[in-house]
Image: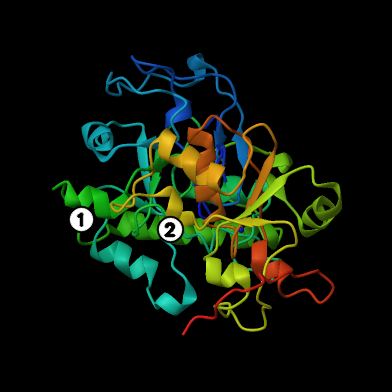
Amino acid sequence: MASALLTRTALFGRRLFSSASPRQPHQLLVTLFNKSPFQRRTDPVHLVFGARSFVCSPVASSDLGSKASFSTQTMSTSEPVVSVDWLHSNLREPDMKVLDASWYMPDEQRNPIQEYQVAHIPGALFFDVDGISDQTSKLPHMLPSEEAFAAAVSALGIENKDGVVVYDGKGIFSAALWVLDGGLPRWRASGYDVESSASSDAILKASAASEAIEKVYQGQAVGPITFHTKFQPHLVWTLEQVRKNIEDKTHQHIDARSKARFDGVAPEPRKGIRSGHVPGSKCIPFAQMLDSSQTLLPADELKKRFDQEGISSDSPVVTSCGTGVTACILALGLHRLGKIDVPVYDGSWTEWGAEGDTPVSTSENAVPES
C-alpha cells in the first residue's frame, strides 16, 4: 500500500515512509531536524506514507553541501505535523519539498491528479499513491519494494537532504506522517495562494515516478538514485501476523473504518469483500482523530478518544482500515501521544475480507444503515 500516506508514513499515510526522514503519511518533515534553530540530523529518521515504511540512510553533513536555512520558529521534533503557517514561511527554501498525496475512495468519484492540476500548494509535486505501489499485488496501493520506492522518490527529484511535507485534498486522509495539519483545505482557508496549473516539469516528474516503479518490477535500469532507503518491516504487518495476533493478543488492534462498516451493517465500497471486522479488534473511526477543520486534535483530546475504547498506552498497537490509508491517521494520533513505531496492516480489510478462510466478526445489536 498509502495514505499515506506517507510518513507514510517516518511513522507514516497509505500508506508509512521513512527517510534519513512519512508514512508519512506517510509519515515527513519534523524528524528531519533538531529543535530550533533547525539543523539536519545524521541519524536515520522514519518517514511514513500510508502503510509504507522505510528509513533513509543517514547522510553525513559533509555530504549535504550547504544546510538549508529553515525558519528558526520553535517546533518540537516529536510533533508529527506542521502548521500551514510554518510551511508558508519555509515554502521557498531550496531544500524544501512538498508533495500532494491526495487519494479518494472509489465511490467519491474524484480524480486526484486532475484536482492537483486545478489547485495545489505552490511548487508541490504530485505523489501518486496508486502508482507508487507494489506492481505485483492485486490489492490496492500496497507497499512497493525498497528498490522501487527509492527509484520513484528519486524520480520526483527528492534527495535525503531534503525536508519533505506531505498533504492531501481532504485535510488529513491519505497523506502520511509527517503531514501538513489540515492539508490543502486549511492552507486555502488561511488565505494562502494556490497554483491553478501544474508545470510541465511537475507532470513529467509524476509520470517518471510511476515509470520508475514499473521499470524496477520489470528488471529494467532506472535513473540515478538520490533517495536511499531501508525497509522497516516491523512497521508493516501482513495477513499472517494479524491472524496470529488474534490468538496471541500481543497487540491491541484498532480499525479506522466507520462504525457501520466495522459492525458489518454497511457494505464495503469494493465488491467481493465481506462485511465485519477482525475478531478482537476495536473501532476508532479515523475522523475521531480530527477536529472540524480536519486538523489533528490536541494530545488530551486524542487520549480521551483512545481511553474511551479501552486502548492502553502501555501495550503495543497495530492499526488497520480499508486499504491501509486512514489506519495511518490512527498511528498519527498515537504518535502525538508519544507512542511511536505503531505498525499498520498493509492489506487491511480489503485483503482480510476477501480471503475465504479468515475469521470475521460482526457486532451484535448493530443497527443497519437506512
Query: Residue 283: x percent and y percent?
Result: 59, 58
Query: Residue 233: x percent and y percent?
Result: 73, 42
Residue situated in front as seen by the camera: 261 or 138: 261
Residue 202 appears in view: yes
Mark 1 neighbour class, 10 Å CA radius: few under 14, some 14 to 19, many 20 or more: some
Residue situated in front as seen by the camera: 199 or 299: 299
Residue situated in front as seen by the camera: 66 or 181: 181
Which type of secondary structure does the marked residue at label 1 adopt?
A: loop
Q: Which residue is mark 1?
A: 195
* Residue at figure coordinates x 70%, y 46% from the top left: 252
* Residue at figure coordinates x 45%, y 19% from the top left: 40
* 205 left or right, relative to 169: right
Q: Earlier in the sequence, mark 1 or mark 2?
A: 1
Q: Which residue is mark 2?
A: 206
Marks 1, 2: nearer the viewer? 1
Residue situated in front as seen by the camera: 306 or 101: 306
* Residue at figure coordinates x 40%, y 37% from the top left: 81
